[in-house]
Image: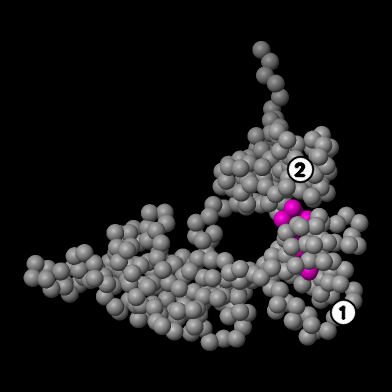
């Protein structure tokens, strides 16, 4: 493997972070190239400067600068939400219009009535310095999290019958697990001791009294991504991807774990019977069993939380029964 200067490698990784979208113009030297015009996502750049790819058609051929022709599209920030339990204290007004000394604790379900008031207060509490980057303005570190996370603002959202506190993050590329932990720790600190501490001390005028809302609390508090908080658990034993065919047309397709629908495959032959054989061959090479393929097909169409998206279901249904025949 040829080595390249560390400075050049660092420049490439800085300019083209993981998650960058790439459009292929031409792959010249590979005997089985990706088709021109194909789109893919950059996984990482290795020490030789090769671009390791996850192509939308399911293939993973890497790109070599100087040999392959491609365009790196400017990365667009995507929205990632971190959810946290929301609580409050409501100080009701008595018959003389004065607020009671003792507040009534409210949880997320009870706060749904006050969603509009809370959202307006969260926006009003933002400072002029936070216009561009939200609370990331106060982050104060020159690291990869600061590079990738363009902005974070606090908001609120109703999900599953209760109102949640939400840190809405605009992110370029993909955060590593370590970067996500760092971001969660920072947002948690802002919710408890920074931005959130100031917010919970400001009354919100609500119907019947004054509301004091807490983005953080001592009991049963956690901060989680949308997937961690709400998504159904994907069954164990599913491959990252598999191949299948469309029943009506015979088109060869690629199914990716956890994603709805499918991707057309570059290896489609145009022949229905040949595509069926090719799907079996490709799955065999990937180590994908017939039950895993069936579960992937169901998951991509009906949702990954349904029973049919679990390969174990098919193994149980077709488990040989023991005990022999009963003769009369």
* Crowd rating for badge 1 (residues with CA inside 10 Å; few <14, some 14–19, many 20+): few
Residue furthest left as drawn:
96
In the image shown, does 61 or 224 lie closer to the viewer?
A: 61
Residue in the picture at 60% in, 75% down: 148
Residue in the picture at 41% in, 83% down: 128
Q: Which mark is residue 80?
A: none
Residue in the picture at 29% in, 59% down: 113
Find residue 3 and report its horizontal and vertical position in percent.
Answer: 87, 79
Is 175 a magenta residue?
A: no
Against 252, residue 129 (above or below) is: below
Against 142, residue 168 (above or below) is: above
Q: Is residue 310 visible?
A: no
Q: Earlier in the sequence, mark 1 or mark 2?
A: 1
Q: Quadrant of the C terminus?
A: top right
User: Toward which corner of the image does residue 55 lie, by quadrant?
Assistant: bottom right
Q: Which mark is residue 3?
A: 1
Find residue 257 and report its horizontal and vertical position in percent.
Answer: 66, 52
Find residue 319 and report its horizontal and vertical position in percent.
Answer: 69, 35
Q: Identify the element where label 1 is drawn.
A: loop
Is 52 a magenta residue?
A: yes
Q: Identify the element where label 2 is drawn.
A: strand
* Crowd rating for badge 2 (residues with CA inside 10 Å; few <14, some 14–19, many 20+): many
Q: Quadrant of the N terminus?
A: bottom right
Residue furthest top as drawn:
328
Horizontally, residue 14 falls left or right of residue 147, namely right
Find residue 62 and report its horizontal and vertical position in percent.
Answer: 81, 64
Give the magenta range: 51-59
In the image shown, does 121 or 282 lie closer to the viewer?
A: 121
Q: Which residue is mark 2?
A: 252
- In three-dimensional space, the C-alpha distance between marks 1 and 2, rounded to whole angstroms, equals 38 Å
């Amino acid at each position: 493997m040829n080595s390249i200067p560390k400075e050049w490698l660092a420049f490439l990784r800085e300019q083209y972070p993981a998650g960058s979208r790439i459009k292929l113009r031409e792959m010249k030297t590979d005997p089985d190239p990706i088709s021109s015009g194909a789109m893919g996502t950059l996984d990482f750049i290795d020490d030789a400067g090769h671009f390791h790819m996850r192509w939308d058609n399911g293939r993973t051929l890497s790109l070599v600068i100087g040999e392959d022709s491609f365009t790196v599209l400017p990365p667009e920030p995507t929205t990632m939400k971190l959810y946290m339990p929301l609580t409050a204290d409501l100080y009701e007004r008595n018959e003389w219009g004065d607020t009671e000394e003792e507040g009534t604790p409210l949880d997320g379900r009870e706060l749904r009535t006050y969603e509009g008031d809370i959202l307006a207060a969260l926006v009003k509490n933002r400072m002029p310095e936070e216009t561009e980057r939200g609370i990331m303005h106060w982050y104060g570190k020159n690291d990869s999290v600061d590079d990738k996370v363009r902005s974070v603002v606090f908001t609120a959202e109703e999900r599953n019958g209760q109102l949640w506190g939400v840190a809405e993050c605009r992110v370029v590329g993909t955060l590593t697990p370590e970067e996500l932990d760092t971001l969660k720790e920072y947002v948690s600190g802002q919710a408890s001791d920074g931005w959130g501490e100031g917010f919970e001390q400001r009354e919100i005028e609500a119907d019947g009294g004054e509301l004091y809302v807490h983005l953080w609390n001592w009991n049963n508090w956690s901060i989680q991504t949308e997937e961690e908080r709400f998504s159904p658990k994907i069954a164990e034993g599913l491959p990252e991807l598999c191949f299948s065919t469309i029943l009506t047309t015979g088109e060869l397709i690629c199914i990716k774990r956890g994603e709805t629908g499918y991707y057309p495959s570059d290896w489609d032959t145009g022949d229905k019977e040949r595509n069926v054989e090719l799907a079996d061959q490709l799955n065999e090479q990937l180590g994908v069993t017939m039950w895993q393929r069936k579960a992937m097909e169901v998951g991509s169409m009906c949702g990954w939380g349904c029973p049919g998206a679990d390969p174990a279901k098919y193994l149980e249904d077709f488990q040989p029964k023991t005990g022999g025949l009963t003769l009369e």
